[in-house]
Image: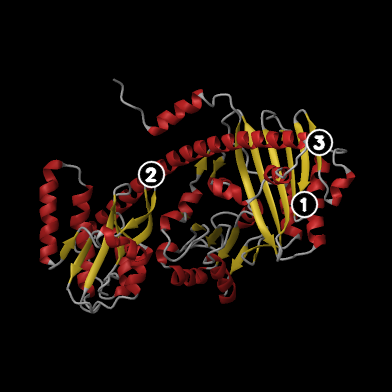
């Protein structure tokens, strides 16, 4: 009997057969932002900008009464243009569907706009989608009226202005504004932080171009070297960015966030960038722009945040005592929505599959580079006669010490770094020796696949814990009590499909509840990245007793 294929193989076969000639709707971008203004002229001007855009593309097809906010519909082969409004006039929606005007006429573009009166503020939404039979890449583009919305309608993200220009962070006041936005729990757009290259005042690529290409989709900030120190003090070194690197901070970021989820790219990687569109910094800037477009429509939850033209139109028709014509229209809209949803889910499945494969390959490549660099560093130290690893005398030295000597085996989570800053345990050397033991004995025991060496490596680990008078426990808290202390005993760190991990294994020294004389190091094993992830140290996590 044939072995069942992998999930990706089965999905590929399903797409080849079931969806071979079915158009797939791919959402290209979406922006839905509030305005700091709340006036009828503000909304009227926004509607006018959308209709002027449509009239410029299809002269003579926009009726005059459309400019008064009234509904209209134009339907012909290859082109549908329509606008609708709800009963109280607080929502106005526009939709156009047309064949591509370039050489790719197999593409059908769908552009939607929403102008809304939310009560305390106005809000404007834009969505661009493309339906195509081919699997070719869709260009990341936004309709021109989005630029007009940003230029003329004072759009904001949690009160911070959304603009087509980059923001310079060069003093304490500008940093405070950046920090407020970065840590805002209701921020909706990603924050891109660029830092100056070590040898110049330039950045790894052109921030002005990135800000222009991603307006309405992200905030772009440019840091001076001095302000990167402020950032490190604010969020911790593992979540910071400096020395020419670029970091993307996604919404809901906090000082407890998993660093892997907020992408960091180093300047050498940007300089050597190569993909199907080109090479070097300019190609990377285009790649990052495409990623930000994709992020804006990355999940069904994001898509549903912006009401569609169909949903508003159907809501008008879903009332008692509909006429026969209205009933037919309502049913037609339901069918079109169901068809669009099918295409959306298929496109999302395709994108997620491709993204997973790309991330897996990228992780393998970076892991190999890291191991090579760590090996080269060890060989260099041997050549210099540095046979022993110095032990820090203060907690301030510990994060850099781990990064310098054990980065290929140990990862200090941001929560662990904060724990080190607040440490009261008096024996700094024991904490460092315990971390060294994790790297020298626990890591080989977990990473090695040779059955003949397993017992020897397990003995080395056990002897090491005895030598340091440590106790090793595989569970930090009973599963039945985890719910009560979930925040304390879990960290934001992605392994597989789970973004939150339990800190089970831990090293223990002392039984007193006095943090000056009691040490705990809580960690977990990441088999995908082959890393010991240290989640908290050196104090005891909360229990009922503490």
Q: Is residue 157 above or below residue 92?
A: below
Residue 208 in the image: above or below residue 276: below
Mark 3 nearby-residue class (10 Å; few <14, some 14–19, many ≥20): few
Give the alpha-carbon distance from disc 1 to disc 3, as whole Å: 21 Å
* Res. 365 mark: 2
Q: Earlier in the sequence, mark 2 or mark 1?
A: 1
In this rendering, would 281 be left or right of 263?
Answer: right
Which corner quadrant of the image does residue 516 belong to?
bottom left
Graded by Cα atoms within 10 Å as few (under 14), some (14 to 19) or many (20 or more), the crowding at tag 1 reads few
Is 18 left or right of 493, judged from the image as shown?
right
Within the image, what quadrant is residue 130 found in?
top right
Q: In the image as oriented, which residue stretches furthest toward the front?
A: 321
Whole-angstrom CA distance, mark 2 to mark 1, is 56 Å
Q: Is there a contact, CB below 8 Å, between mark 3 and mark 2?
A: no
Image coordinates of residue 524 in percent, x first then y, are: 28, 56
Residue in the picture at 69% in, 39% down: 110
Structural crowding at the residue carrying mark 2, measured as other residues with C-alpha within 10 Å and reported as few (<14), some (14–19) or many (≥20): few
Camera-side residue of 256 and 446: 256
Mark 1 or mark 3, which is nearer to you? Answer: 1
Residue linked to disc 1: 87
- Residue position marked by numbered label 3 in the rendering: 74
* Horizontal relation, residue 182 to residue 473: left or right: right
Residue at horizontal 23%, vertical 64%? 435
Say which quadrant the N terminus sits in.
Answer: top left
């Amino acid at each position: 009997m044939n072995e069942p294929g992998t999930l990706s193989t089965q999905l590929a076969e399903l797409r080849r057969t079931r969806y071979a000639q079915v158009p797939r709707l791919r959402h290209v971008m979406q922006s839905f932002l509030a305005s700091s203004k709340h006036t009828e002229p503000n909304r009227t001007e926004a509607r006018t900008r959308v209709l002027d855009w449509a009239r410029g593309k299809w002269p003579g097809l926009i009726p005059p009464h459309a400019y008064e906010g009234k509904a209209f519909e134009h339907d012909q082969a290859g082109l549908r243009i329509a606008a609708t409004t709800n009963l109280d006039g607080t929502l106005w929606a526009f939709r156009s569907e047309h064949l591509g005007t370039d050489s790719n006429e197999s593409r059908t573009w769908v552009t939607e706009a929403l102008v809304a009166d939310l009560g305390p503020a106005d809000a404007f939404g834009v969505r661009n989608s493309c339906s195509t039979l081919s699997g070719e890449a869709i260009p990341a583009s936004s309709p021109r009226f989005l630029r007009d919305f940003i230029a003329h309608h004072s759009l904001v993200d949690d009160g911070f202005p959304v603009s087509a220009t980059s923001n310079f962070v060069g003093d304490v006041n500008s940093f405070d504004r950046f920090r407020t936005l970065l840590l805002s729990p209701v921020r909706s757009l990603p924050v891109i932080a660029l830092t100056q290259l070590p040898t110049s005042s330039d950045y790894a690529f052109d921030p002005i171009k990135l800000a222009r290409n991603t307006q309405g989709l992200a905030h772009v900030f440019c840091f001076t070297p001095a302000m990167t120190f402020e950032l490190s003090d604010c969020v911790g070194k593992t979540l910071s960015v400096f020395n020419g690197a670029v970091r993307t901070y996604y919404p809901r970021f906090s000082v407890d966030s998993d660093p892997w989820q907020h992408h960091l790219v180093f300047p050498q990687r940007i300089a050597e960038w190569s993909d199907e569109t080109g090479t070097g910094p300019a190609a990377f800037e285009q790649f990052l722009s495409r990623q930000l477009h994709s992020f804006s429509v990355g999940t069904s939850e994001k898509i549903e945040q912006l009401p569609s033209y169909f949903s508003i139109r159907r809501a008008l028709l879903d009332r008692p005592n509909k006429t026969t014509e209205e009933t037919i229209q309502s049913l037609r809209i339901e069918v079109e929505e169901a068809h669009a949803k099918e295409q959306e889910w298929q496109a999302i499945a395709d994108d997620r599959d491709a993204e997973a494969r790309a991330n897996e390959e990228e992780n393998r490549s970076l892991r190999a580079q890291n191991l090579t660099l760590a090996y080269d560093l060890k060989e260099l130290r041997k050549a210099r006669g540095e046979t022993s690893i110095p032990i820090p005398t203060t907690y301030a030295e510990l994060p850099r010490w781990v990064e310098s000597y054990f980065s290929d085996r140990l990862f200090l989570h941001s929560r662990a770094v904060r724990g080190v800053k607040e440490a009261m345990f008096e024996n700094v050397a024991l904490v460092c020796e315990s971390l060294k033991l994790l790297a020298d004995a626990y890591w080989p025991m977990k990473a090695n696949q040779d059955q003949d060496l397993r017992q020897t490596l397990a003995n080395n680990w056990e002897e090491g814990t005895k030598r340091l008078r440590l106790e090793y426990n595989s569970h930090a808290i009973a599963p039945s009590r985890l719910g009560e202390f979930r925040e304390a005993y879990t960290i934001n760190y992605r392994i597989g499909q789970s973004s939150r991990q339990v800190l089970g294994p831990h090293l223990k020294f002392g039984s007193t509840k006095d943090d000056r004389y009691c040490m705990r190091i809580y960690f977990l094993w990441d088999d995908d990245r082959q890393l010991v992830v240290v989640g908290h140290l050196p104090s005891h996590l909360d229990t009922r007793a503490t």
